[in-house]
Image (cartoon, grey):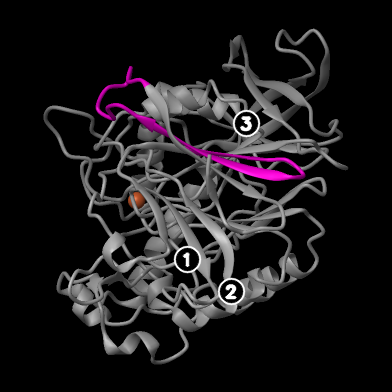
Amino acid sequence: MFTLGVASGDPTPDAVILWTRLALDPTAGDGSGAMPDEDVEIAWDLAADERFERVLASATVTARAADGHSVHVDATGLEAGTDHWYRFRLGDETSTVGRTRTLPTGAPERFSVAVVNCQMYESGAYGAYRHLADEDVDLVAHLGDYIYEYAGGEGEGRHSLPNRVLETLGDYRLRYASYRLDPDLAAAHARFPFVATWDDHEVANNYMGDTAPGDVDAEVVRARKAAAYRAWWENLPVRLDPPDGSDLAVYRAFDAGDLARLVLLDERQDAAEPPCRDAQSTGLDFGNCDEVEGEDRTRLGADQEAWLADQLATSTATWNLLGNPVVLAGVDGGSDTAAYYLDTWDGFPQARRRLIAQLAEVSNPVVLTGDYHAGMTLEVRADPFDQSSALVAPEFMAPPISSVLFPQDVSARTPQLLEQLNHHGYLVVDVTPDELTARFRVLDDVADPDTEISTASTWTVRAGDPEPTRA
Ligand SMILES: [Fe+2]
């Protein structure tokens, strides 16, 4: 029954979400997990030790058929900055045991976050997650592309289910189940609390707001968002109410005492259509166009933009970490002329200037990014690409867990780029009151689940000085 494992997430100093999803056969083609169409009551235990000798809480919870038989238990009354262990029970069946950790309060000496993204199942094994389980981090921040919506394919190699482009709730449910059957991904969820946002592939490639490449009808996009958001909510350990149709506010913040505030952004749901979408729909999503500097396109939507302004203005943290799914500092991959991915912040220059101006006002802003299928260290300048403008923040881009690399060298026209790493892996960010350390952990061979891992580079940032230094 507990075939999809356990997970925890969205910790606070005294609570954490405990997750599981019941499935008799996770591979059932309709995404139902072969579960009967009725609610199931299960029990959960939370303990101060791995052997459950000191149980702190036990209760029951209903796994509703309407929620795909998932549960999100909010376990409260916990001690701050402390490891806890949890499990679920049904009859004589017991789930695997998960470990989780509440957020610290006060003045922690250290806080550590692993940053992950882009885990296309078909293009590589999850050796990165196997190694991540050995790291000593307080939580894992997932910046998106948790699943990809393409047909799973068939034949040799890894294939997720179903073998069709995802459209319905059943399709998306089956895709999450298929990914979660990977033992290394399941083990990472059982080891650390996750805090997750999303990028485009949780719904569809390059969707923005209620638009998608190829002039898809807005109603069709909304229906797909509703199915995809519902399945995302069911399958991730988030402290959120279920979506209302195609609406789900996922932006939120996590405080590690007064040491660090981590803000997670949603850069898809309410975004305006990117410039030159007509050209993109004919295959050009990488280029330049006169429309870029035209109208003021929103990236975050008015509600999230106001919320973010408040989160930054009220922060008393030494470090302000921005969980930002797509690159902020700007990347120009052209040779003779400029060429941008117009669905990154490069397609939203006015909104980007506003965001960077806000970051310039806070204590030690650091941007954490994904999406680009490479590891990068960049400088976020007040006026991106103008190296004579003020340095506002360092930006660290986590390498992809398994998605296909985009190894094109973008250094020629991107002076703010300090390093590009064309490898798979993850990023570990440690903060102390004096210093931030970013370590790029990279795999030898993403195709090999038993691959080795090493640290490709380490950067440090001193509190009070945004310039990253290679260690
Ligand atoms: Fe991706």
Query: Distance from label 3 to label 2 (Cα)?
Result: 28 Å
Residue 4 visible from this viewpoint: no
Kindly identify the residue that appears in the image at 33 percent across and 82 percent down. Answer: 275
Q: Magenta includes 451?
A: yes
Q: Is residue 255 above or below residue 5?
A: below
Kindly identify the residue that appears in the image at 25 percent across and 79 percent down. Answer: 288
Q: Looking at the image, which is closer to me, 362 or 106? A: 362
Q: Residues within 10 Å of mark 3 (few under 14, many from 20)?
A: some
> Which of the marked residues, 3 or 2, is nearer the chain's N terminus?
3
Q: Secondary structure at mark 2?
A: helix
Q: Residues within 10 Å of mark 1 (few under 14, many from 20)?
A: many
Q: Magenta includes 162?
A: no
> Which of the marked residues, 3 or 1, is nearer the chain's N terminus?
3
> Which of the marked residues, 2 or 1, is nearer the chain's N terminus?
1
The residue carrying mark 1 is: 328
Using the image, tell me which numbered label, if any, was put on residue 355: 2
Q: Amino acid at mark 1?
A: Leu
The residue carrying mark 3 is: 137
Q: Is residue 170 above or below residue 330?
A: above
Q: Looking at the image, which is closer to me, 248 or 335? A: 335
Drawn side of residue 429 relative to residue 207, left or right: right
Based on the displayed image, in which of its 4 quarters is residue 402 positioned?
A: top left
Query: Distance from label 2 to label 1 (Cα)?
Result: 9 Å
Kindly identify the residue that appears in the image at 24 percent across and 27 percent down. Answer: 447
User: Residue 266: where, in percent of width, then height?
Assistant: 53, 62
Are dots 3 and 2 in contact, CB under 8 Å?
no
Using the image, tell me which numbered label, if any, was put on residue 470: none
Q: Secondary structure at mark 1?
A: loop
Most distant residue in the left direction = 155
Q: Secondary structure at mark 3?
A: loop
What segment carries the magenta color?
427-452
Kindly identify the residue that appears in the image at 51 percent across and 66 percent down. Answer: 380
